[in-house]
Image: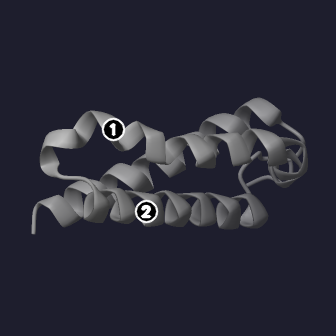
Amino acid sequence: MPPSAPINLRSGAAIVVAAASGAIAGATAAAKLSSEQFAWTGFFLVPLFVLLEVLLKHVAALFDGNRDVARFTLAAAIVAGFYGAWFGLRSL
């Protein structure tokens, strides 16, 4: 990848951390909520999205200052980690 690419080693680490945070929240939601309360799972994501917005100025530096790429990529990683853990634990 060229050095000006928005995804680099530091931003890749941020993506992994975001996905792991989402997975922890998803596993917690799967353990706490019954399967009939699937609609409530989004409330477990709200604190992660608020944290992302609060830290976006600092995290965007990892994505070469591109806030839109940082926001979209990290939000997608959070959601993927969350629902991956949720459905993974629910299928056991």
Say which of 10 and 56 sits in front: 56
Instruction: Tell me where residue 39 sits by quadrant.
Output: top left
Say which of 85 and 60 sits in front: 85
Q: CA distance from mark 2 to mark 1?
A: 16 Å
74 vs 55, left or right, is left
Residue type at the position of mark 2:
Ala
Badge 1: few (under 14), some or many (20 or more) residues near its Cα, within 10 Å?
few
The residue positioned 33% from the left and 50% from the top of the image is 83
Among all residues in the image, which is located at the extreme left? 92
Q: Position of residue 29 (x, y in %)?
A: 34, 56
Q: Are marks 2 and 1 in contact (CB under 8 Å)?
A: no
38 vs 19, left or right, is left
Tell me which numbered mark, 2 or 1, is placed earlier along the sequence.
2
Callout 1 secondary element: helix
Q: Position of residue 49 (x, y in %)?
A: 63, 41
Name the residue beneath numbered marker 1.
40
Say which of 82 and 73 sits in front: 82
Q: Nearer the viewer, mark 2 or mark 1?
A: 1
Q: Quadrant of the N terminus?
A: bottom right
4 vs 92, left or right, is right
21 vs 1, left or right, is left
Instruction: State whether residue 88 is above or below residue 7.
Output: below
Which mark, by number, is residue 3?
none
Which mark, by number, is residue 23?
2
Instruction: Tell me where residue 73 sits by quadrant.
Output: top right
Say which of 22 and 38 sits in front: 38
Callout 2 secondary element: helix
Instruction: State whether residue 64 is above or below residue 72.
Output: below
Residue type at the position of mark 1:
Trp
Report the number of discs: 2
Q: Position of residue 92 (x, y in %)?
A: 9, 69
